[in-house]
Amino acid sequence: MKLLRSAFSALVMTLLLAGCAAEGDQVGNPVVRPFQWFSYANGDDIRRDCAPGRNARYRLIYNAIYDEQVRTYDILQYATSGTATQTTRVLRGSIGVDWLLGQVTGSGRGQGGSSRVDISPAELGAIEQALIKSGFEQPAIRGQILHSDEFYWIAMVCREGNFKYYAWTDRNADVAKLPFRDVLAKGDQTGVPFVEPHVPVVFGRSSRYYTSGPDSTYFTMQVGDNGLIK
């Protein structure tokens, strides 16, 4: 009974957290993450603060099957100095009863790594050029479906009050060879190996389960004119 009460209390707290918009520094929290992922992937926090004269912000997300690995890259360029920082996080997106009971430990799901490094204006410029070379300046592909059990990239940028959003899947790009991947790797000091795109074993398109456990995760997100469709 005590265990059930603890689980219920954790669930209530999680649902309360779900009502908040995701911030970049919260995505590493395994309790908050599953309920704020849409907000984070849509860049709600970046949109909210996107105005002329404010700090430029970049966010790129690599979904390497949500249950296996997600890599996030948050870059902040300070308007007053031109200097920038890159925060890289590596995590596994799926959740199970372990985190619900407050037993997230050093092993298992929800684990990953993070790093924060200063990057030079030249390195930031290289990221911008790599994005352009990858087709980022094109309009977002309206209706594009992002499957959690596939490999895709999302990028969003706010510069001088202008917000831009784009996504790459294997239906509109070679996900493994997008130019910005190597540039971002220079500021990635997590030490966590990159999960390369591969064709997973699918046990039925309807279930999309890759393991027999109860914590397998599948969901879709749809791209609209300049972000995700809510």
Image (tube, rainbow, N blue to C red):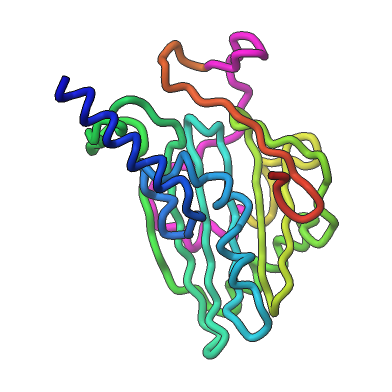
Residue 202, image quadrant: top right
The stretch drawn in magenta includes residue 179: no
Residue 184, image quadrant: bottom right
Which residue is located at x 84 percent, y 57 percent? 138
**Quadrant for the C terminus in the image:** top right
Q: Is residue 46 left or right of residue 90?
A: right
Residue at the extreme bottom of the image, as rendered: 80
Q: Magenta: predominant secondary structure element?
A: loop
The stretch drawn in magenta includes residue 198: yes
Q: Is residue 68 left or right of residue 221?
A: left
Magenta stretch bounds: 181-209
Task: Tally the marks.
Answer: 0
Q: Position of residue 65 (x, y in %)?
A: 55, 31
**Quadrant for the N terminus in the image:** top left
Which residue is located at x 52 percent, y 62 percent? 74
Please determine whether, in this image, residue 97 is positioned above or below residue 158: above
Which residue is located at x 57 percent, y 79 percent? 55
Q: Position of residue 180 (x, y in %)?
A: 65, 57
Please determine whether, in this image, residue 220 is positioned above or below residue 36: above
Which residue is located at x 73 percent, y 45 percent? 229
Please determine whether, in this image, residue 1 is positioned above or below residue 84: above
Q: Position of residue 45 (x, y in %)?
A: 56, 62
Q: Position of residue 24 (x, y in %)?
A: 47, 59
